[in-house]
Image (cartoon, grey):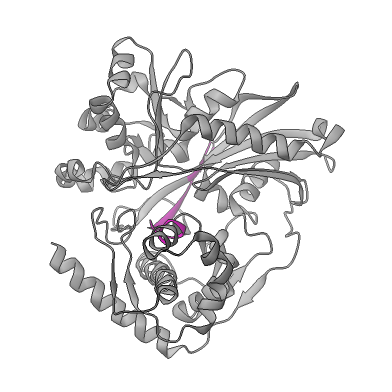
Amino acid sequence: MSDELYLAIDQGGHASRVMVFDHQGRVVTEGSTNIGTRRNEEDHIEHDPDEIIASLWSALALALENLGDKIEQIKNGGLATQRSSIVCWDRQTGEPLSPIISWQDTRTAKWMKKFAQYREMIHQKTGLFPTAHYGASKLRWCLDNLPRVAQSYESGRLAFGPLASFLLFHLLEEQPILVDPANGSRTLLWNCQQLDWDNDLLQLFEVPREALPVCVPTHHQYGHLNCNGHRIPLTIVNGDQSAALFAFAEPEPDTAYVNIGTGAFVQQVLAEPRDDVENLLTSVVWADDRHTRYVLEGTVNGAGSALDEIGRSLGIKARAVEAHLEEWLLKAQAPPLFLNGVSGLGAPYWVADFTSRFVDEGEGWEKIVAVIESILFLLNENLHELEKYLSPTRQLVITGGLSALDGLCQRLADLTQRPVYRPGQCEATARGTAYLLAQPREWPEPSPGTWFYPSANHNLEDRYHRWQIALNDALSIDK
C-alpha cells in the first residue's frame, strides 16, 4: 500500500493541473497548462472546449513524463472541475456543439428573474437559488440560441450538462456520459435528497432529461484513462470546491474552510439539510450508497476574476499585479472601497446584475488593494450568515492561489477575529481529490503551514463598516 500512487486532475478557471500523490499525501510529480477565457460586454464568459481537452492531455503528459516506471504504481485517478460550467456535445462523435459556458457567465440573468416566485421550492429541492450562474438556464439558452444544439437534440444525438461530464467522455476510453453529485447538483435540476434529476425542475426549466448525463455516486467506476498504453481507472469525480474541503483529511465541524481562486468560497460542515436556511447554499460534497455529506456554502463570484477584470480596466498588467500585490497590501493605508459585483453579486445577496463600482478615489494600485479587501468583506458577510445556523467557528483554514498573500491572510484574521491557518500546500482541490482516492488512516501535511492570529485593525474595521453602508445604499438604489 505504501508504494501506491494517486492521480488527481484539477480543471480550473485559469489552468488544467495534474498532480500525483503518494499514500502520505506528498506530491510526487505534477504538470500544469494554462487556459484562456473569452469575455464580452454582454456578460458572456466562455472557454474553448478543444483547448480545455488539449490542456488536460498536456498537463497529464507533463506530470507523467518524469514518473518513469512508477506510472505502474498509480492505483487510480480522480477528476475535479468547475462545478457550474456547462457544455453541449454530440453523444456519438464527442464534437463540441457549444463553447464551455463558465459558471461566472450571467447572460441569462434577465430570463431567470421569472423564476423568482419558485425560489423557496428550488432552494428546498436543490440547496441553490434561481440564479444565472447555475446550469439550467445556460442549457436552455443553448437549445434556444445555438442551431447545432437544437438540431442535435432533434436527431437524438445531443448530450449536454456539466463540464465534468464532457471531460469524462473525452478523457476515458469508455466515453461515458455520466455525472457525479457535486457537479450535477450545480445545475438547478438535481434533487439533493433524491440524488437524481428532478422531474418538476426539468419541466420548469424545459430541459430534456434524455440529453443529460446519467447520475452516479461520487465514487464510481467511471472508466479508464489511457496514458501511453497505461490504463488508469478513474474512480472519483467531484467539484473543485467540494474536493478542496478534503485536502487535509476529514473537515472539522468547528472550522470554516475558505478557498480563493477565480471565485472565493467558504464552507462549513452541515450534518443534514435544513429547511430554515436563507441566502446560503446547501452543497453536496460527497454521495455514495451509504451516506451523503453536506456543507453550508457562501460564494463570492469575483476573486481572481475580479483582480483580472479590474486590472485590465486600469491598464495594469496581470504580471505587475502578481509581482507587486504583496507590497501594495503592506503599504496601503487608506485604499478606496470597492463594491464587488464581478460575475454577479453572490451570497448572501444574490444580485446577478449588480454593477461593480469604486467608492472614493485612489491610485490604480490602491484600487487593486480595494478589490482584495472587497473579497474579504464579502467572505465576512458570509461567515456572519453561517453563524445564524451553525456554531461559531473556532478557526479558518484558507487555501487557493490568492491565499499565498500574507497581507490577505492577516487582514482576514483581523477582520473575522479568528485565527487563520494557511497550509504549506495551498492547491487544495488536487490534494483533496487524492485524499478521497487514497482514503488513508493518516494524511499528514507535507510541510507545516502558517498561522495568522487576529490583531486590532481599526482602520480595516472602519473600512468594512463604511463598505457595508455603501453596499446597502447601492442595493437600494439599484432596486
* Residue 270 falls left or right of residue 202: right
What is the x, y in percent for residue 462?
35, 86
- What residue is drawn where x is 26% and y is 53%? 352
Viewer-side residue, 78 vs 317: 317
What is the x, y in percent for residue 399?
57, 61
Quadrant of residue 245 within the rendered picture:
bottom right
Residue 120 is one of the magenta-drawn residues: no
What is the x, y in percent for residue 306?
40, 60
Quarter of the picture containing the N terminus is: top right
The range drawn in magenta is 285-306
* Residue 454 falls left or right of residue 247: left
Quadrant of residue 228 within the rendered picture:
top right
Extreme residue in the front direction: 315
Residue 290 is one of the magenta-drawn residues: yes
Numbered marks: total: 0
Viewer-side residue, 159 vs 384: 159
